[in-house]
Amino acid sequence: MSQLSSKIKSTYTTVTNFLKRKIKRNSLNTKIWFFLILFSVLILAFIWIIEVVFLNTYYKNYKINELNTAVKELQKDFSQNDLSSLSQIAINNNVCIEIYGKDNYEAKYFNQGCMEFGNTNFEVKKDFINSNINHKKYKLINNQFKNDTLIYALKLDNSTYAFLNASLQPIDGTVNILKSQMIYVTIVTLILALIIGYFISKKISKPITQISTKAKQMGEGNYDIDFNTNIDIYEIHELAETLNQAKNELVKMDELKRDLIANVSHDLKTPLTMIKAYAEMVRDLSYKNKDKREEHLNTIITETDRLNILVNDLLDLSSLEEKGNFLDIKQFDIVKVTQEIIKKFNILTEQEGYNFIFKHPKEAIVTADKKRIYQVIYNLINNAINYTGKDKNVTIIIEEKQNSYLISIKDSGKGIPKEETKLIWDKYYHNKKKHKRNEYGTGLGLSIVKNILINHNCKYGITSSKKGTTFYFELSKK
């Protein structure tokens, strides 16, 4: 006996441990399973209440409705002087009808199981006829069948009366049968709910669990995953699509991050190497030769300036990418600002033959951050210089529109493939271009432009063909 008891305990422990491993308390699978079982229990409880607790009440109300229906049909037929259908009315509504007329004439229409009144019948008739009212309900006990009987007494005219009765059959036995049946139904239903609920919860939770596992892998840096599932549920499909899109964006961001680090490192390394080399040359070789020393020191200054430009661009970009970046919005003449910027590049016109074509109205007052828009136009002209064609033309156009001014900067280069126009705003995108002419800038210019224009809520864009590329943006007049 003790061995059997220990085996039972061991089996119980094994099953319990298995369920603990398989059923996690707050898992989606457990929650779905629990709510499916709870739903089944609530449905069963509702059926128990209706079928067992309220069955007597429902039955009484049903019989009263039958009696009322028979009364209405009887009144209708009597008003039409047609009593031929009384027997059918009694059968259809499961009631008994007795007509009491002149000269003590009685015509009885019985339905199966109806009550013979005897002396009680006489007392009911006498009471109702003497009351001189149009209708009255009685509740009597049928001594023959030991059950309640409802009687509806009705005055049809001054000399004709109708008595309708409906027997309330005892349904205690029926209730006991239903209770017994419901016990088995409840047990079977709960078992089926446990089994079916388990498989349904598994089917629904499995793809979500898989997606969650893959999301953790993605969080650990593994982007070689696909969130798509075979489950035909709209919300899960949408979740998978969203996570796939997020994964693709993270892959792009990761690539951009690596490119940014590599390019910044390269751009820092080159001038630092030059500064160190020329500083050593001044220290060891040219410190006595004035001309050589001046040449080497100028190179150091130039490379230091390059470092300063790169650091400033990185700081500007970091500042612009922060949410809520402050803008000093004022009104100013964009024509004058552009003219000032073009003057900065006069040295390229004199020494390298660049041609700056500026088309503009006499005045163009816009509302924006003057310092930031100056930076936008400067960077776009600088970009056009780098990629313009052999004619070295750069065209700047300011056009007046209804509520804004359109500023366009165009080069005459080879253009950009359509599929790459969205990438042109990425940091260091210029390193991928084969036709760059010079090294004026840090490769962060267009990314800075994009962030400034986004902060201004400006419309901006790019058009490109084999004859050149045009960058454009709009500034509000007010």
Image: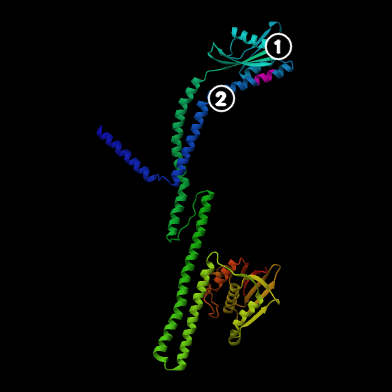
Which segment is the magenta one? 69-74
- Residue 467 locus on image (x, y percent): 63, 76
Q: Position of residue 74 (x, y in %)?
A: 68, 18
Q: Position of residue 426 (x, y in %)?
A: 53, 69
Give the quadrant of the C terminus. Answer: bottom right
- x and y, in percent, of residue 229 in the image: 49, 52
Query: Can you tell which mark lies on residue 58?
Result: 2
Q: N-terminal of the two: label 1 or label 2?
A: 2
Q: Quadrant of residue 336?
A: bottom right
Q: CA distance from mark 1 to mark 2?
A: 33 Å
Q: Is residue 213 above or below residue 306?
A: above
Q: Amino acid at mark 1?
A: Thr
Secondary structure under the numbered disc 1 in the rendered image: strand
Query: Seen from this angle, which residue lies furthest right?
Result: 80
Considering the image in quadrants, where does the N terminus appear? Answer: top left
Location of mark 1 (residue) = 160
